[in-house]
Image (spheres, helix red, strand yellow):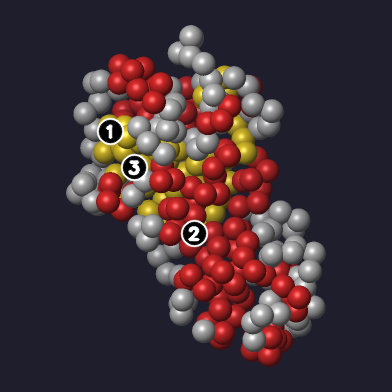
Amino acid sequence: MDDFKFKKKYGQNFLQNKDTIKRIAGLGDVVDNSLIIEVGPGSGNLTVALADLYKRSNILCYEIDNSLEDSLSIRLKDYTNVRVLFCDFLNSDIVSDVSNYNYNKLYFISNVPYYITTPILFKLINSGLSFEKIVMMVQKEVGDRFCSLPSNREYNALTVILNYYFKIKKEFIVSKNQFYPRPNVDSVVVSFEKKEKKEYLNDRDFFIRLVHDSFKFKRKTLRNNLKNYDLDKIEQVLKKYEFDLNVRAEALDYKIFVEISNVLL
């Protein structure tokens, strides 16, 4: 990769530290005969670690940069359990792609391109696929947001939605010095473990829309952000938790949003 021209538009910063790469791969706890999705394999460092560690599972990679095709083909030529699709993951039909495999469980393990972290997570959620575990390295401040608690500055709509679906854990910090080229910020590896039992939702899409609308203007109250909803029903739920319509969305646990969603629809 010495002569490779890194492309800023794809957020290419390749992790070099082998111990860190193996540690990320190991966090998957992947069972045999499973399928692992990786987005942005880049130099193939994590891909190789996954293929070596989980020899009885398949790895499906998505790489948007076609200029990496030759180097990845050489790097991965001996790994029969790896397939790389050179396309934009966000425009891919992943439900169709994974249907080509017979697998016990589905995982997502990736050092994702940071500029599309949130779109990737929403694509995974919206796919309807059941991911046993998601492990991804993200910018440290983004990881803080994922793991934030109510009333913290970082707490936002994505935090609420992710906490409905997953048990989220901040695993470890990765210094910017472990990358080439070196980025401007440190990173963090975060794991998302599937919740076996989630609260009942009348309508998943409505819940997601409600949460986004609640945080639309972060400094405004629910009374203002949700003025197009039935405020009387919303207030009934809030009173149970000793809140009123003058509360800001950032103060509410995800379970309260679930209850509001179900009352409204």
- Name the amino acid, label 1: Arg
Q: Position of residue 169 (x, y in %)?
A: 55, 50
Q: In this view, does 135 lie above or below 128?
A: above
- Mark 3 neighbour density, 10 Å: few (under 14) some (14–19) many (20 or more): many
- The Cα atoms of the two marked residues, 2 and 1, are separated by 27 Å
* Residue type (three-letter) at the residue carrying disc 2: Phe
Residue 30 point in image, percent of width and height: 34, 44
One can see residue 49 in this view: no
- Identify the element where label 1 is drawn: strand
Q: Which residue is drawn at 62% across and 35% down?
A: 187
Please say if 10 is above or below 178.
Answer: below
Give the quadrant of residue 75.
Answer: top left
- What separation in Å lies between label 3 and label 2 (alpha carbons)? 18 Å
Residue marked by disc 3: 36
Among the two numbered marks 1 and 3 on one chain, the one whose residue lies closer to the N terminus = 3
Q: Looking at the image, which residue is at 64% across and 86% down?
A: 230
Q: Where, by quadrant of the figure, is residue 27 drawn?
A: top left
Badge 2 is on which residue?
166
Quarter-wise, where is residue 215 in the image? bottom right
Position of 65 with respect to 216 (left or right) is left
Q: Name the residue under label 1.
A: 83
Q: Which amino acid does label 3 sit on?
A: Ile
Earlier in the chain: of badge 2 and badge 1, it is 1
